[in-house]
Image (cartoon, rainbow, N blue to C red):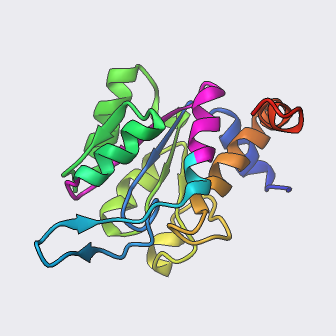
């Protein structure tokens, strides 16, 4: 796949992918059982993309406005060490994480889908959204994957980052050899 040169240049410098959860890793639908328990659906394609990024040396973080045990479980299953829940102040949370990791904001790709994400999308070195986000959010993103949130958009982002950084062939090779 080809990407615009300005987007490719920004993607080359990314060392951290920070993601909103509801609407990005999920389709934004909240499911509540009769006992009040909340459930979420995550896309398996996104999960492997996240693992490939981490194996390639790109850290991944989740910054979400809601608190959910499912987010903790999913993060643990994927080996995501940086999880900030209950944070509507996405840029403040992202800035604190960058300070903790000693990373400048221009080394971060941030993907969000709604108003609480706008400041982080605009401040990150590579601002991303998903194609089912409102237009007033998407216009602030540097790039928008073809897929929707919860439907493989994060995988598309991961694949694009790996490709732009020249790491895709190394990620693909073990699977071609039956070692993946």
- Between 22 and 106, the one lying in front of the other is 22
Asked whether 59 falls inside the magenta stretch, the response is: yes
Q: Is residue 94 visible?
A: yes
Q: Residue at x 66, y 27 (%)?
A: 56
Q: Is residue 89 visible?
A: no
- Between 79 and 10, the one lying in front of the other is 79
- Between 58 and 101, the one lying in front of the other is 58
The spot of residue 69 in percent (x, y) is: 23, 50
- Between 16 and 62, the one lying in front of the other is 62
Place residue 170 in its image quadrant. top right
- Assign the C terminus to one quadrant of the image: top right
Question: In the image, 32: left or right of 51?
Answer: left
Place residue 113 in its image quadrant. bottom left
Of all residues, the one furthest to the right in this rendering is 177
Q: Residue at x 57, y 72 (%)?
A: 148
Q: Which residues are magenta?
A: 48-68
Q: Is residue 149 above or below residue 89?
A: below
Q: Is residue 119 above or below residue 103?
A: below
Asked whether 13 falls inside the magenta stretch, the response is: no
Q: Residue at x 38, y 61 (%)?
A: 118
- Assign the N terminus to one quadrant of the image: bottom right
Question: In the image, 140: left or right of 14?
Answer: left
Place residue 77 in its image quadrant. top left
Question: In the image, 177: left or right of 133?
Answer: right
The spot of residue 24 in percent (x, y) is: 46, 62
């Amino acid at each position: 796949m080809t990407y615009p040169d300005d987007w490719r240049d920004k993607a080359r410098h990314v060392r951290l992918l920070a993601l909103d959860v509801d609407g990005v890793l999920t389709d934004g639908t909240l499911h509540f059982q009769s006992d009040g328990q909340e459930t979420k659906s995550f896309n398996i394609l996104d999960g492997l993309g996240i693992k490939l990024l981490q194996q390639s040396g790109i850290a991944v973080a989740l910054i979400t406005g809601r608190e959910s045990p499912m987010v903790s479980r999913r993060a643990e299953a994927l080996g995501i060490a940086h999880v900030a829940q209950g944070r509507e102040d996405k840029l403040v949370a992202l800035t604190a994480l960058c300070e903790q990791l000693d990373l400048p904001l221009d080394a971060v790709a941030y993907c969000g889908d709604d108003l609480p994400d706008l400041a982080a999308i605009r401040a990150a070195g590579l601002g991303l959204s998903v194609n089912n986000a409102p237009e007033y959010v998407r216009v602030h993103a540097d790039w928008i994957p073809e897929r929707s949130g919860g439907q493989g958009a994060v995988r598309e982002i991961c694949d694009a980052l790996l490709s732009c950084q020249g790491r895709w062939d190394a990620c693909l090779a073990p699977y071609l050899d039956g070692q993946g």
